[in-house]
Image (tube, grey):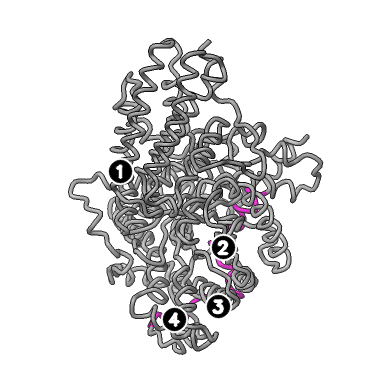
Amino acid sequence: MQKEFSQLLSSKPAQLPLPAKASSHEDLVHKLTLAGHVNLAADHLLHPEMRGSLETVVGQTIRKLNLSVRRASCYWDEKGILEWFRAYEYLLQLSFSLLGVERKWVGFSEEEVLSSVKLIKEALSSWQEWEGKVDSSLPVSGVTLDHLLSDMKRPMSVYYRPPGSMLSKMAARIQEKMGDRLDLVRFLEVWREEFQSNLYYRLSISGLGKFGNDYALGLRWLRHLGFVQVSTNPVLAACAYEDDPSLWEGFAGESFCADFKQLSLGKTNPEELTMLATEVSIFPNLAVFRPIFLASGYQHGLVSYQLNPHVADSLEASLRDALRIYSDASDFLLKYDDYLLWGYSPALERGRPNLVFKVAGCGPASIQITSELESLGIGTNNTETYSVSQETHLILAKMEGRARAVKKGIRLTTCYETTMIGRLDDHLREVEAEVLLRRALEVLGREALGELLREMKIEAGGDFESNIKLVCDRKNLSPIHKEPFAKFLAKAGILGKTPEEVEQKLRVIEDDLTYAGIIVTKRVHKIFFSPENRKKWVAWLERKYGLTEAQAEEVISGIDMLPASKRKPRETLLTLSASNLTNTEFPNFQALVFQESLSPGFDPMRLRESMSWEVAGEVLQRLCAYEVAGECRKVLELTPELNQVLREAGVEADLGDGGMRPEEWPSFGAVQKTRKEFLGAYEGLKRKVLQRIG
């Protein structure tokens, strides 16, 4: 019976008619809630025009739901039980948003938030009292709690990466504090304590930083913590299907999102099917972020969509795919906005996607693709970017495209410039390790490589060269000071005569290399967005493109650096800024950062504008002295052409001119490795898609 009860409460939401029909906000919310669209119902109230009326509308909605719940307590039939469950979830989802960072973006006062939550708690308490009198053997509230906490645990539940997702750990702590109690008011208090004490919430609510999620699931919970962006790529799209198989068949969510089974009917083209599969994995996130995108004036709530990596070097093919996906997103959001924005000002733009496209900075074509998309008012997120020169070129391309758009009166969205910090660090480590290994093999002989493979418990992968790559691969040699590698180098007298001496030097190398991506991010941010340089770029935009000061400000204010693919908490904690910066990270990395925040004496307020802090000069000196010095120069310096542009803008940046030109980007090792991985992941997702349709 309990299983049947749970299945009933997981019923798919009813299909919504178009256009939306309601007599008032509370009428719309009531209808949406009973139809199972509880998130949409809760998000409908997250609008600036609701300021000053929130408590009234919440009370009116509770009145209508109160009648539905009371009816259910009298009849206790399937319809009533399901509506009761949905009423619980609506009030809880609304409370989460009012107690989360969303209230700041919408502009609700603390007074109206607290008074509205007080009404909600009173309703929850009385409904639970009725529930206990009807049938305590089938607690609707218990299933509600299980449903919510299970959803929190979903990210990385199958695609597990140590130490697991931050959200799953938060859910476990909430469960532990709740014990066997099914008190929803108590649950709401425990939830508030857990979320509002979280480092990300504290940094977001205080304006010290913005954050994004490198995963397609769990976004609604992270929104409450202040997360404003989500990134996807072929790897992450595949992960979403592992963690939530309902995306393949019978997607049980809401908000007009179709599942893959529906969308794939009649389709046979593998590329089109793979595109649809990716859309299915991220379109629900467009809905999650929709209210904060609109409330913030297009500043927050962007979803990054990875374009097909096979067409990354083709302007026409990339534009064709982007415009097709953008059109699909607009069609979906026009329906969604019909309900989300019902009753609000007709001047509000409906259907404009809160979507930006990930454009791989793997070659010269990326510059033109970036500029063209931005000129259409479609934001970009440059990825596969590792160097100061790459990112400087691409930010200039963004400026050029955004200037063309703003002159036509097109309102701009936030766009992003990714620094793949961890992947850059991995590349530099592999290069450094390979040089050291080859030097050791010159002393010990080629046959000694087999001994090292055995010591490191690595299965030989082919010829001599491929085995060298295998030893140095980040999957086998991270960190670089692993004991077998240190012993091997010591045996050859490389870096020292004893394993202990070599290991100590390798530890310093490892630590130094993990600053390279941080330095790239800091240098680019300083070039464009430091207080002294930002105003120079505003003036440059006015001169070069004939913009007004307000237009130039709009162009530059919406470009955010996006540090990503991180490995160590400091890669977030040392790159915080209130302007032009969003840190994005994996669910398991969020757990590492949160754990770091629990260290004795940790004070997030001391991290204010840590982006402006310089990395110690001796670290940079050592980087330029290691075997990997040539690679460091490629990523840390500019080019003669870029230095000329900076001089024209009046920006002083004494960073050298040994950086990579656009034609050199495709041959850079980190670009090649990431490209290979993304292509492989894309093909893997395509194979799964084709298997699904038989």
Residue 678 lies in the magenta stretch: yes
Q: Main secondary structure of the magenta part?
A: helix
Q: Amino acid at mark 2?
A: Val
Q: CA distance from mark 1 to mark 4?
A: 37 Å
Viewer-proximal residue among 523 and 456:
523
Q: Which residues are magenta?
A: 653-682
Secondary structure at badge 3 equals helix
> Crowdedness of circle 4 by 10 Å Cα count: few (<14), some, many (20+)?
many
Residue 390 lies in the magenta stretch: no
Secondary structure at badge 4 equals helix
Q: According to the image, label 3 marks what residue? A: 403
Q: Is residue 507 above or below residue 16?
A: below
Viewer-proximal residue among 410 and 143:
410
> Crowdedness of circle 1 by 10 Å Cα count: few (<14), some, many (20+)?
some
Q: According to the image, label 2 marks what residue? A: 671
Q: Is residue 123 above or below residue 337?
A: above
Q: According to the image, label 4 marks what residue? A: 538
Q: Amino acid at mark 4?
A: Val
> Crowdedness of circle 2 by 10 Å Cα count: few (<14), some, many (20+)?
many
Q: Amino acid at mark 1?
A: Gln
Residue at 30% of width from left, 53% of height from top? 498
Q: Nearer the viewer, mark 2 or mark 1?
A: 1
- Residue at the front extreme of this rendering: 23
